Amino acid sequence: MELAQRGHEVHFITYAHPFRLPHFMERIFFHEVEVVRYPLFDHSPYPLSLAAMMHEVTLREGLDVLHVHYAIPHATSAWIAKEMLGKQHRLKIITTLHGTDITLVGQERSFEEITRFSIAQSDGLTAVSEYLRDETISHFGVPGESIEVIPNFVDTSVYDRGRYPCHKKVLTSAGEKVVMHISNFRSVKRVNDVVRIFDRIRRQVDCRLVLVGDGPDRPEAAAEVSRLGLSKNVLFLGRQDSVAELLACADLFLLPSASESFGLSALEAMASGVPVIATRVGGLPEVVEEGESGFLAEVGDIEGMAAAGARLLSDQPTWRRHSAAARAGAERFKVERVVPLYERFYERVLGDTGSDFAASAPHKADAAV
């Protein structure tokens, strides 16, 4: 969306309309990949359908860049599309590594070689954190200089808590603090730890836990809430589109994950002026500044995270100081700073060394999500 506002033409090639994309924006186009079912196959060959659509859109729209997110299957599909186009096309493939494609799926024995191949066939590589860059170098032998670290980003104007009305009366009783967690409720997020940390915090501070999102571990989290007798103190909101509006109500954000390649939800909380209690894993130390925008602890250190949370919530001057530091820390990742990094990277990969990509004639980039 930001690239389109800066004059570039963006084509989304994916099986579903991106949920954060409005129905219409100038210079943004959506191409749906049809998921075809064949009696011959138990599972749809989606990567091939994606490659075919990439090839079709590149020819029809004259794309300059296929910017794919996650190495497999998207970088693999992009390579197939480029091979179909032939050597005469100047199309470049840029792959952004986000995490699970490197730290989980890519290290599965059956996927390791195709992940390595797909990375090697990319004309440009970016990773969302130094941690992920180092993981890619370690596990796939990729030369360090070939990976550009361009972090995830946040629109700080959207996550400005001052622009939203306070909804605390809807979420809590009078005087209660709001402790929040937002995730896909998968095991790596350790949502049961969220509940246990909150249980210890509430013994010292009057507060309520608001859980946003859904996923396979939600039933287990609900069972833990019931086991600890917290049913009146915990609110499950499910999936929500208005994340910024909800974060504007929060006083503390919990993210006790077992692994995070970056920690985008922590960044969004910080942009909302919400101090973060998180684990010292992956890319989180690159986002959350220890003792400033929040506190970091080891995975499973429920007591330590609860103690840090209780200190923040029980001392208003301390909370205000950390809230201001969180907002200031998020400025390092604001969209106005990060998107130009992508523009310069596109320019370098395309070989447009004699001109400024951002100021030159609009380019056509595709994001396969």
Image (spheres, rainbow, N blue to C red):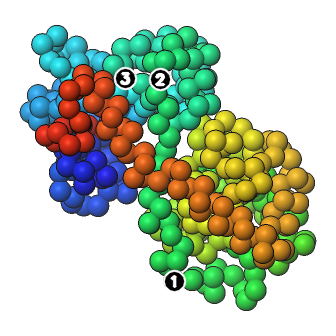
Residue toward you, 219 or 91: 91
Q: Nearer the viewer, residue 354 or 257?
A: 354
Q: Is residue 48 visible?
A: no
Q: Which residue is mark 2?
A: 147
Q: Residue at x 44, y 58 (%)?
A: 155
The amino acid on which the numbered mark 1 sits, given as a three-letter code, is Pro
> What residue lies at 16% left-to-right and 10% top-to-bottom?
87
User: Looking at the rendered structure, which numbered label has been put on residue 124?
Assistant: 3
**236 or 313: nearer the viewer:** 313
Q: Is residue 226 left or right of residue 214?
A: right
Query: Is residue 186 shown left or right of residue 302?
Result: left
Secondary structure category for the residue under label 3? strand
Instruction: Say if residue 357 shows up in the picture.
Output: yes
Can you tell which of label 3 and label 1 is closer to the viewer?
3
Mark 2 or mark 1, whichever is nearer to me: 2
Instruction: Name the residue located 52 percent from the left edge and 77 percent from the top edge.
Output: 162
Which of marks 3 and 2 precedes in the sequence? 3
Give the class, few, some or many, for how many residues have Cα within 10 Å of label 1's Cα (few <14, many ≥20). Answer: few
Q: Which residue is mark 1?
A: 165
Q: Residues within 10 Å of mark 3 (few under 14, many from 20)?
A: many
The answer for how far apart the CA atoms under marks 3 and 1 are is 43 Å
- State which quarter of the image contains the C terminus: top left
Q: Earlier in the sequence, mark 2 or mark 1?
A: 2
Above/below status of 8 relative to 131: below
Q: Secondary structure at mark 1?
A: loop
